Amino acid sequence: MVLIPKTKNLIIFVSLILAFNAATLCNGGITSRFVRKLAAATDMPLNSDVFRVPPGYNAPQQVHITQGDLEGEAMIISWVRMDEPGSSKVLYWIDGSNQKHSANGKITKYKYYNYTSGFIHHCTIRRLKHNTKYHYEVGIGHTVRSFWFMTPPEVGPDVPYTFGLIGDLGQSYDSNSTLTHYEFNPTKGQAVLFVGDLSYADTYPNHDNVRWDTWGRFVERSVAYQPWIWTVGNHELDFEPDIGETKPFKPFSNRYRTPYKASNSTSPFFYSIKRGPAHIIVLASYSAYGKYTPQFKWLEDELPKVNRTESPWLIVLMHAPWYNSYNYHYMEGETMRVMYEAHGFVKYKVDLVFAGHVHAYERTERISNIVYNVVNGICTPVNDSSAPIYITIGDGGNLEGLAKNMTEPQPKYSAFREASFGHATLDIKNRTHAYYAWHRNQDGYAVEADTLWIFNRYWNPVDESTSATA
Ligand SMILES: [Fe+2]
């Protein structure tokens, strides 16, 4: 065909625009070429204001809350006192009410190499009303500290609810930027789904657990006011036989609680909760998951019980991603994928899987890789409308820095990837639609760098169009 000059010019013009576009279109989706500052990620020094100890002798510090039961009618309130055990009582009341309730918690304490923890308090308050603002107080006399939280709406299919998503946070200047961006995001997250790797204390000599304390004080400004749902990562293992520390997850287990018994789990590292319109399954990448293990049996029992009429959105959290096209932790999630993808996530139409571990951002298409057997050798991920979207959001900003090196060309299954620090929000509107947005720290608080309307797999299983912007 002979092109007339006008059309030819237009084609050249369009080609030039594509060439200069910030995003590079490869075999797969979009690899964002966003230009960011390349300063090394550094931890904030111990005397930083975000680590400040609250005033007063033995004042409660590191206050944090997480859901305390299956359906959001209980909250686990935790805090630490450094000098002496003190009272383990929580005083709580409904906003505007004079009727105060109290509950007593339990105290724990641990040693790690040459470190001795403060007195760690955990108190579960129960029979809370849904969709209600509660105030709570810990401490006595001059050191009373007051906070508040909102309980979630009653579990149901069409109650809107907004989750924040943060992973691999650490305590660097970038971590502080991520947390600030989450707090100031105009799409207000009501609870955080945290995908593992909290303090990075284990990167210090002898896993200096003082960095667990600083992290607790750093994130208090958010997690004392809204529950963070915990997933464990490799930086929670703290398994160090060289220094005699052979009990995995010791600091995390003493400091952070999960409501695992409420979902019939036998381990605090894998469990589920219902919150508003979502059924959230938390998996443990670093606990046994092979056939016949407690995690395998628990998940096998859990998935058929998910009632999509009551909880339409089925979300899974884990630390090591199954689909990740960065040259970091490549295929570390592969063995768990082989165990759970076909007979778990695809069969039961999981909507979304969030993981961390890789210090960057990536979103996949809906894909599966479940046809392979030893004889047929078919092992390429393919589009699958029953499969979840996999999102890697290990971009909280810890001291280990960004994962900038990507496998090339971008695999077809990868819809959008960018090596920037940030966080995301998942704004569930009703049983059919949720609005997802990823934010990078370099932008203003309201700027959304990657967005997608997500359609529920059970109620609205049509294909989403990739609406990424870079
Ligand atoms: Fe990790």
Image (spheres, grey):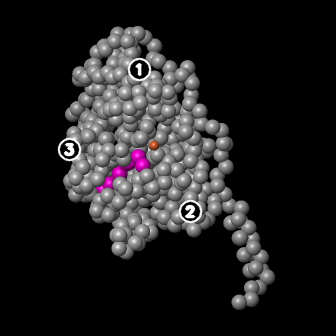
| Position of residue 109 measured from the top left corner of the image (x, y, whole percent) | 32, 21
Q: Earlier in the sequence, mark 3 or mark 2?
A: 3
Rendering quadrant holding ligand 1: top left
Numbered badge on residue 378: none
> Residue at label 3?
264
Q: Nearer the viewer, mark 3 or mark 1?
A: 1
Mark 1 to mark 2: distance in Å? 45 Å
Mark 3 to mark 1: distance in Å? 34 Å
From this viewpoint, is residue 63 visible?
no
Residue at x 63% of width, y 59% of height: 23
Q: Earlier in the sequence, mark 3 or mark 1?
A: 1
From this viewpoint, is residue 354 visible?
yes
Instruction: Tell whether position 315 is magenta.
Output: yes
Nearest the eye: 387 or 141? 387
Which quarter of the rendered picture does the C terminus lie within? bottom right
Q: Around disc 1, counting alpha carbons within 10 Å, would you say few (fewer than 14), some (14 to 19), or many (20 or more)?
A: few
> Residue at label 1?
115
Compared with residue 93, is residue 19 higher up or lower down, i.e. above or below? below
Q: Around disc 2, counting alpha carbons within 10 Å, would you say few (fewer than 14), some (14 to 19), or many (20 or more)?
A: many
Is residue 37 toward the left or the right of residue 56 in the image? Answer: right
Q: Earlier in the sequence, mark 1 or mark 2?
A: 1
Instruction: Tell whether position 88 is magenta.
Output: no
| Position of residue 339 measured from the top left corner of the image (x, y, whole percent) | 32, 58
- The span shown in magenta is 312-320
Compared with residue 222, is residue 168 higher up or lower down, i.e. above or below? below
Report whether the residue tagged 1 is closer than 8 Å to ligand 1. no
